[in-house]
Image (tube, rainbow, N blue to C red):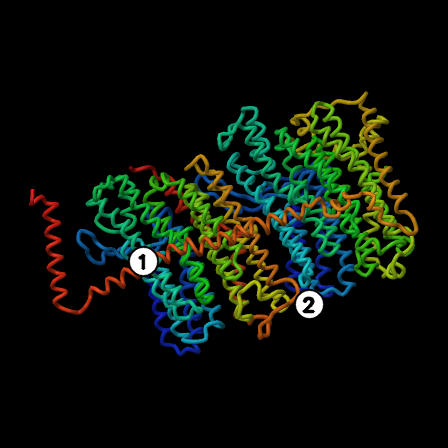
Amino acid sequence: MAGILEFAPAIVLLPFLSFLIALGAGRYMPKGGALAGIGATAGSFALAVATFFAVSGGQTYNQHIYTWATGVGDAVTLDFGLLIDPLSAMMLVIVTLIAFLVHVFSLGYMNDEGETGLPRYYAALGLFSASMLGFVVSSNLLMAFMFFELVGLCSYLLIGFWFRQDGPPSAAKKAFLVTRFGDYFFLIGVVAVFATFGSAAFAGPDAFPVLAEEALHGEHSVNTFLGMGEEAWFTVVGLLVLGGVVGKSAQFPLHTWLPDAMEGPTPVSALIHAATMVAAGVYLVARMYGFYALTPTTLAIIALIGGFTALFAATMGVVKKEIKQVLAYSTISQYGYMMLGLGAGGYVAATFHLMTHAFFKALLFLGAGSVIIAMHHNENMWDMGGLKDKMPVTYYAFLSGSLALAGIVPFAGFWSKDEVLYETLIHGLGGSPILLAAYAMGLLAVFFTGFYTFRMVFLTFHGEPRTETARNPHGVRWNVKAPLAVLGVLAATAGFVNMVPVEKLLGIKGIDFLHQFLDGSFSSLNAHHYAEILPYSSSYIGGEATTVAIGAGVSLGLALAGAALAYVLYNVPEPVEHTEKLGSIKTVLYNNYYQDEYQVWIATSVVQPISRVLDKFDQGIVDGVVNGISSVSLFAGSRMKRIQTGVVSNYAALLTLGLTALLLGLGLIGGWFA
Amino acid sequence: MIIEALIAVTFLAALVTFVVPDRYAGKAAFALSLVPVLGSLYMWQQYDASGNALLGGSAAFETDIVWLQLGQYDLHWLVGVDGISMPLIVLTTILTTLAIVSAWTPITERQSQFFGLMLFMEANLLGVFTALDFFVWFVFWEAVLVPMYFLIGVWGGPRRKYAAIKFFVYTNIASLVMFIGFISLVFGLGDSISSLRLPEIAQALQAGQLGGFAGLSAGALASVAFIAMFFGFAVKVPVAPLHTWLPDAHVEAPTPVSVMLAGVLLKMGTYALLRFNFTMLPETARSFALPIALLAVASVIYGALLALAQQDLKRIVAYSSVSSMGYVILGLIAYTTYGVGGATFQMVAHGLISGLMFMAVGVIYNTTHTRMVTDMSGVADRMPVTAGIFVAGAFGYMGLPLMAGFAAEFFIFKGAFESTVMEAMPLFTGAAMFGIVIVAGYLLFAMQRTLFGPFEFDGDYEITEAPFHDVAPLAVLLLLTIVLGVSPDIFFTMIQDAVNPILELGGAF
C-alpha cells in the first residue's frame, strides 16, 4: 500500500472531472452525464478506502500541493495542502460512499422520472462532491473556508434545481443567505487566525492550534487585538469561526434554512442536507479541535448550542406532515448531538455520531425518496399508510435506519448517541453544571426522537392505505433498492466499530476500534492529545461501569418510551393526528417557534425599510446638495450675465468703479492712509 | 518605445474607426482593438520592472525625454510601467475589446463615432496608467472625460444630457480641486525639484524637502494638499457621499459604456489615490487613518444598502460598485502588503466582474428592453446560457472562492485586519466585511425575481437566447475571473513587489 496516499488528490479531482464532463458534454451522453458521475465517485470511493487502510496502517500525509498566493517580502504565502489523517480518511470514505450511492439512486429518482436538465443536475452533483472532498482534505483554515463556500454554492444550485417553480429558488436563496450570515463570522475568524498566528495550518510545524497552546503556556508569542489577553482573544476567534459552523450545520438560531432546503430533489437532500455538507460545520470543529479544546467558554457554548438544538428541533419534528420535513428537523437535532459531544469533550463520540448519522440519515432520506417515487411525488404522510407490504426492501431498510435514529440497541445510532451523552454526563459530573444542563436537554430529546421517528414509520408504512396512490404505489427499480440495501446494512452494523459500553461493562479490551483509529494521527491531532488539553475532569455515579449502565439504560428507556407512545397513537389502521391534545403548543410547533417569522421580519421589516429610507436620503439629501450647489452656480451665472449689457458706457463705468475699489483696497492694506 | 507605440496605435485605431462606414465600424473597431490587447499581453510577458516606479524602483519600458520648459520646470515625456500599472493596462485593453463586441447589438446609429470614441478613450486610459510625469498624466486624465461625456450624452437613455453634464462637471470640478492640491505641493517643494516627474516629486517629499507655502507650515500644507487630492480622486472612485453622479451616469449610459465606466474609469480614481496620496504623503495618510477608514466602511455598507433598495438591475450593479470600491479604500489605508496589494488586485478583479455584470444586464436588456426587476420573471427558462453566466457572475460578485473577487476581498480583509495604522482596524474591517452578506442579499433577490420562478413577461418581445456575439464576451470575462481567482499570483506578485516600497516609507514631516 506504500504510496497510495500520493494518489489522494485524485479523490478530489475525479468528481471535478465528472463536473466538467457533465457540464460540457452531458447533453450528448446517455443518462445525462450520470455515468461520468457514477464512475468518478466509484473511483474516489475505491481510492478513499485504500487511503483509509493506509491510514489504519499508521500512515499520514500532510503535503503542500498548490501555492494560491505568494507573499512577497514579509507577507505570508497562502497555500493549498492535503491533510490525510484518521479523521479526514474516515470522512473521505463516508462522503465518497454516499456520493456514489446517491449518484446511483439518482438514476431511479431523476432519470427514470423523466426529468429535464439532467446535465445541470449531475454537473452540480459532481462539483459538490469535489468541493466537499476538497474541504475534507484541507490542510488549513483558508482552504477549508474556500471549499466551505463552494459547497454552499452547489447547495444553492441543487436546492434551486427546479427553478421554474416558485418554491425552490426562494428556498435556495434563503439557504445561501442564512449560511452566508454565519460565514461572515467565519471569514473574520479566518482573517483573525492569520493575523494572530501568521498561519492557518491545521497540522505541521506552524499549526495554529499548537501555536495557541504554546502561547497559553507562555512559550510562544502571538498577536492579540483590541487589548485582549490570549485566552480571551482565542475565545473570540473560536466563536467567530463557530459562526460558520452554526450556519452550515443548521444549529440554532441559523437552522431555519434546512427545512426549506427540502425543496431540492430528495437525493440531494440525502447527500448534501443530511450526510455531508451539513456535517461540514461539525467536521470543522473536530478538525481544529486542538484549538477549541483550549478555551472552556467556547466549549461550553458549543455544548449548550448543541444540547438546545437537539431538543428544540426534535420537538418541532413531532407535528410535521411531510416525511422530508420530519427528517429535516431530525437532521438538525442529530447535528445538535454532535455539537453537544464536541462541546462536552467527546471528540471521538461526536466523530462516531457523525459517521453513523451519515449512514442512517442518508438511508432515511433515500428511503423517503423511494416512498416519494412510489407516491407519485406526494410527500404527505397522511396520504400514505400500509406501504410496508408493497415495498418490503424500502420498508426494512427504512426500519433499520429508524431504529438507528431512535437509538435502539444494537443499531448504529444507539452506540454513538449513547457515547455522546455518556461523555457529557461524566464531564458534567466532574464539575461543569453547564454540561449537565446540556445533558438534560440531550436526554429529553431522546424521547422526542423515538416518538417522531416511529410516528413517521407507522404513518408511512403501517395501517391501511389512506389514498388511492398508496394502494397502488409506483414501483422502484434496482437503482433505488441497491443503495437502500447497502445503507440499511450499515445503519444496523456501523455501531460495532466502537462498542465502548460493552468494553466497559464486560471488560473486553480493544473493541473501541474508532478510539484506537483516531489515536493514530499526528501527535497534535489525535484523540489522546485532545483529552490532555481539555479543561474537563470526569466523575462517576458509583463506578465507571455503573455510570455506563445507568446512562445507556436511561437513554434506551426514553427512546423506547417515545417509540411506544408512537405505537399506541399511530400504529392503528386509521390513525388520527392527536395534535389537539397539545393545545396552544400545537400552533407554536406548527409555526416552528416563529423562528422563520422573526428572520423574515428582520429582512423585510427592518433591513428593507432602512435601505429604502437611505435611498430617499441619498437621492434627496446627498444628491440634493450636489444639485443644489449646481443650481446656485447656475443662478449666480444667470445674474452675472446681466452685467454684460453690451452698452459701452456701462462697461466704462464698471471699469472705473472697479479700478477705484482696487486702489482703495490696495491702499488700505498697504497703509497709504495711515 | 512600446508604450508610445501602444498609445499611438490605439489613437490611430480610433481615427481609422471614425472614417469607417457605420455598418462596418463595430467589426473594424473590434479587429483594431486586438492590436492593443496583443501589445499589452506582450508587455506583460516582457515585463521586467522591480519595485515602485515612484520610489526608486526600475520601471519597465521607460522613456524619459525633456519635452518643453515651463518656468523653472522641465516638462518630461516620462512613461513607464510597474507592478501597480501593468495589471490595469491589461485590464483596459481586454475590457475595451469586450465592451466593443458587446456594443454590436445595442448601438444602432452613428456607429463609427461611437466605436471611434471608445478607442479614443482607451488610448487616453492607457496614457493615464503609464504616464509618470504630472503634466503628461494630467492631460490624459482630463482627456478621458471628453469621449465619456459624448458616449453618455449622445448614445445614452432619456436623461442622458443631465447625466452626462453631471458626470462631466462633477468630476471636472473634482479634478480642479485635486490640481490645486498637487500644485501647492509643487510650490511647497520650491527649488528642490526641477521637473514635474512624479518619481522626482515623490522622492523629494520623502526626503523632507517640503517647505511652507502661502502661510502654511510644511505639515499643514501636506494636510491641505492631501485633503484636496483625496477629494478630487474620491469623486472619481467614487467614495460615499461623493457618489451621486455614478448611478445617474450608469443608468443613462449604454451598456458598453457602463462597462468601461465601472470597469476602468473608476479605477483611475483608486489608482491615482494610491500613486499620489498614499505613496507621496504616507505620514499624512496615516494621520487621517480614522476618517479614511470611516469613509471606506461607509461606502461599503451604505452603497450595499442602497443597492438593496433598487429595482433597476443596472442601478443595483452601479451602487454595488460604490460598495466594492469602498473595499479598495479600506485596503489602501491599511498600509500592509495584503491591504494595499489587495486593493490594487481588487481594481482588476472588480473591473472584470463589474464588467461582466453590466454586460449580463445589458444582454438581458437587449432582449427584454427592460431592466426592472418587477417587469420579468423566469427569464432563465428562455435564456439559459445567459442566465447561467449571470448566476456565475453574481456569485463572483458575492466573493465566491476561486473567483477573482474573493481573492481581492480576502487579501484586503487580511491586510486591513492586521494593519497597525490604528488600534481599532480589526473593528473597521469586521464592519466593512458585513458587505459580503448584503451583496448576497441583493443579488440573490434580484436573481430569484428575474431569472427564476415561472416565466412571465408583459412586453411584446420574443424572449430567446442572445446571439453568440452577445454571450461570448460574458464567457471570456467569466473565464478570466476564474483564472485570476484560481491563480491570483498572475498579477499579485508583481503588485506586491511595487507595493512593498510604499510600506517602508517613514515619516518625513
Q: Residues within 10 Å of mark 1 (few under 14, many from 20)?
A: few
Q: Position of residue A501 (x, y in %)?
A: 82, 30
Q: Chain of mark 2?
A: A
Q: Residue at x 46, y 43 (%)?
A: B338
Image check: A666 left or right of B344?
Answer: left
Residue corresponding to mark 2: A28
Give A318 or A646, whichever is nearer the viewer: A646
Quadrant placement of the C terminus of chain B: top left
Query: How far apart, in angstroms, are the residues tagged by discs 2 and 1?
Result: 66 Å
Which numbered dot is residue A632? 1
Which is more N-terminal, label 1 or label 2?
Answer: 2
Give B347 or B10, whichever is nearer the viewer: B347
> Of the residues shown, which amino acid type is indicated by label 1?
Val
> Of the residues shown, which amino acid type is indicated by label 2?
Tyr
Count of residue discs: 2
Q: Is residue B404 visible?
A: no
Q: Residue at x 50, y 54 (%)?
A: B306
Q: Chain of mark 1?
A: A
Q: Nearer the viewer, mark 2 or mark 1?
A: 1
Instruction: Say above or below: A423 vs A586.
Output: above
